[in-house]
C-alpha cells in the first residue's frame, strides 16, 4: 500500500455520507482494516471524536465526524465477528464504540499488545514500534494539534494517516511470529481482555475512580459516594469533565468535613469560586442524604490495593518479581504484560489464604500460568530454590528443585 501525501485533502478526507458508506463496504469486502482516531478529552465528559483514520491493503482515508454524522455502520463493523480491526493501543477506539453505539468490539488485534508477547518491551509508542518492526520512521509534531479546529491542515492529515498506513504491515509480521512461537492464542486472549476491561469502565460506580477514597471511614465513604453520584450526573448533563465540576481532593475534603450548611460547604478556600456557590445547595443535599443513611447500611471501607504494610508480603513480592523478570527474559516476553506487582500480591494472598477462599489470581490463569504460574507457586511452596549462577549473564538466575 502506498499513500501520496501530495494529494489534496479533499482526496484523502471523507466528508460525504455516501463516501463513508462506500468506504465501509470496501472494508467489509477486504475483511481487515487498520483503524485509529484523533480526539480531544479536555473539554467534554467523554473524549470528543474529531477524526477517524482507516487503511486497507489498497486504500487509506480519514473521515470527518463533524461532516459525516451517521457513523453507525462503522461501529457495527467494529462489533461484528468477521472484520479484523488492527489498532495500536486501542483503548480509546474500544471506548468510542461503546459510547457512540453501545456496542462491543470483537475481532480486535492490538499491535502494541502483540509486540509485548514476542519481545520484552511494553508498551511501545507507535513511532518506536513501527521503526522496530519495519525500520520506517513516521513523522511527529502534531501531538498537541487542535483536532477539533477546521479546516485540518495537510500536515495534520499526513500525521493522522501515518498512524494507520503501516499497521497492516506490522500486523502481518506479528501474526506470523505469533504463529511460529505458538502464541496466537495468547494474543487473542489479551486483546479480548483489553476489550472487556475498557467496557467494564462504563459499569464501574463513579466513586471507584476517586483518588483517596480508600482513606475514608464508613460515614465519610457514604458521603463521598453520594457526592460522586451527583458529580457524575452533573458532568454528564453539562457535558464537561468531572474535574470541572468538583476535583477529587475537594470531594474527599467535603466527605470528611460533612458540612451542615451552604456556608460550611464553601468553607474550603479552594471553593470560593462562583461555580461552587452555584452548586453549593446541591452539594449540601448530597451530604445530607449520606448522613441520613442508617449506621447498619453504611458501606464497608475500601481497602487500598496499593497498601502493603506487611513486611513478609513485601519480601515475597520482591522475590517473585525477580523470578517473573527472569522467566520473561528467557521467553522473550514483556514482564509488565505478564504481571504487575499488584498481580503478584494477588497471587501471594491467594496462596496464603489456602488457594480456595479467593478467585483464581490472574497469574494462575491461561497462558500466564504456563509462563510463570507454576514457577511462582512452587517458589512459595518451597519446591524450588533460587540461586545466582552467573552475575554477568543476561539470565543470571537459576531455579532448581529444592532437594537438588
Image (spheres, rainbow, N blue to C red):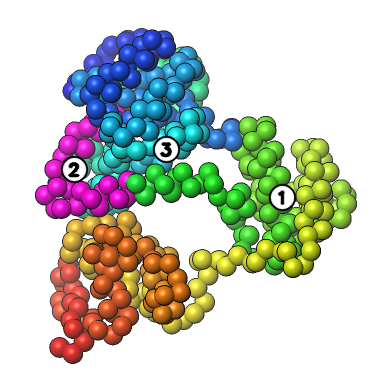
Where on the picture, by quarter, is residue 136? top left
Q: Main secondary structure of the magenta part?
A: helix
- Residue 186, horizontal then vertical, whole percent: 25, 52
Name the residue at 60% across, 50% down. Answer: 205
- The residue that mark 3 highlights is 104
Q: How many numbered tags mark residues here?
A: 3
What secondary structure is marked by label 1? helix
Measure the alpha-carbon separation of dots 1 and 2. 47 Å
Q: Would you say residue 200 is visible in this rendering?
A: yes
Determine the residue positioned at 88% across, 52% down: 261
To which quarter of the image does residue 213 belong? bottom right
Location of mark 2 (residue): 174
Q: Nearer the viewer, residue 31 or 3?
A: 31
- 269 on left or right of 24: right
Residue 149 versus residue 135 in the image, above or below:
above
Q: Residue furthest left?
A: 180
Magenta segment boundaries in residue numbering: 164-191
Q: Which secondary structure lies at badge 3?
A: loop
Question: In the image, is residue 184 part of the stretch drawn in magenta?
Answer: yes
**Residue 227, numbered circle:** 1
* In this picture, residue 347 sits left or right of residue 277: left
Which of labels 3 and 2 is toward the front?
Answer: 3
Position in image of residue 403 (x %, y %): 18, 90
- Whether tag 1 and tag 2 are in contact, CB under 8 A, the answer is no
Q: Secondary structure at mark 2?
A: helix
The image position of residue 147, as x and y in percent, is 47, 25
Amino acid at each position: 500500500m502506498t499513500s501520496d501525501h501530495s494529494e489534496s485533502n479533499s482526496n484523502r478526507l471523507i466528508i460525504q455520507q455516501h463516501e463513508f458508506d462506500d468506504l465501509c463496504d470496501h472494508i467489509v469486502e477486504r475483511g481487515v482494516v487498520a483503524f485509529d482516531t484523533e480526539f480531544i478529552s479536555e473539554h467534554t465528559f467523554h473524549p470528543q471524536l474529531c477524526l477517524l483514520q482507516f487503511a486497507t491493503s489498497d486504500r487509506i482515508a480519514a473521515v470527518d465526524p463533524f461532516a459525516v454524522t451517521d457513523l453507525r455502520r462503522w461501529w457495527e463493523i467494529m462489533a461484528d465477528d468477521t472484520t479484523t480491526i488492527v489498532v495500536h493501543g486501542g483503548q480509546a477506539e474500544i471506548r468510542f464504540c461503546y459510547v457512540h453505539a453501545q456496542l462491543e468490539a470483537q475481532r480486535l488485534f492490538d499491535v502494541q499488545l502483540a509486540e509485548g508477547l514476542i519481545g520484552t518491551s511494553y508498551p511501545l509508542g507507535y513511532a518506536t514500534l513501527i521503526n522496530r518492526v519495519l525500520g520506517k520512521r513516521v513523522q511527529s509534531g502534531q501531538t498537541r494539534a487542535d483536532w477539533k479546529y477546521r479546516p485540518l491542515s495537510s500536515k495534520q492529515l499526513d500525521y493522522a494517516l501515518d498512524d494507520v498506513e503501516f499497521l497492516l504491515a506490522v500486523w502481518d509480521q506479528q501474526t506470523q511470529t505469533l504463529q511460529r512461537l505458538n502464541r496466537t492464542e495468547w494474543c487473542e486472549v489479551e486483546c479480548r481482555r483489553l476489550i472487556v476491561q475498557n467496557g467494564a469502565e462504563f459499569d464501574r460506580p463513579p466513586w471507584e475512580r476517586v483518588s483517596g477514597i480508600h482513606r475514608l471511614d464508613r460515614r465519610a465513604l457514604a458521603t463521598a459516594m453520594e457526592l460522586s453520584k451527583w458529580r457524575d450526573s452533573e458532568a454528564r448533563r453539562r457535558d464537561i469533565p468531572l474535574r470541572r465540576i468538583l476535583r477529587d481532593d475537594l470531594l474527599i475534603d467535603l466527605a470528611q468535613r460533612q458540612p451542615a450548611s451552604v456556608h460550611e460547604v464553601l468553607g474550603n478556600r479552594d471553593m470560593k469560586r462562583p461555580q461552587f456557590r452555584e452548586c453549593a445547595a446541591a452539594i449540601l443535599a448530597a451530604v445530607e442524604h449520606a448522613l441520613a443513611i442508617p449506621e447498619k447500611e453504611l458501606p464497608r471501607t475500601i481497602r487500598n490495593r496499593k497498601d502493603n504494610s506487611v513486611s513478609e508480603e513485601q519480601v515475597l513480592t520482591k522475590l517473585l518479581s525477580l523470578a517473573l523478570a527472569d522467566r520473561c527474559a528467557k521467553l522473550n516476553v514483556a514482564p509488565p504484560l505478564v504481571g504487575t506487582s499488584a498481580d503478584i500480591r494477588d497471587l501471594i494472598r491467594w496462596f496464603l489464604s489456602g488457594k480456595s477462599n479467593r478467585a483464581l489470581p490472574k497469574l494462575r490463569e491461561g497462558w500466564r500460568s504456563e509462563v510463570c504460574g507454576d514457577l511462582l507457586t512452587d517458589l512459595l511452596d518451597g519446591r524450588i530454590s533460587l540461586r545466582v549462577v552467573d552475575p554477568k549473564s543476561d539470565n543470571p538466575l537459576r531455579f532448581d528443585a529444592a532437594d537438588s
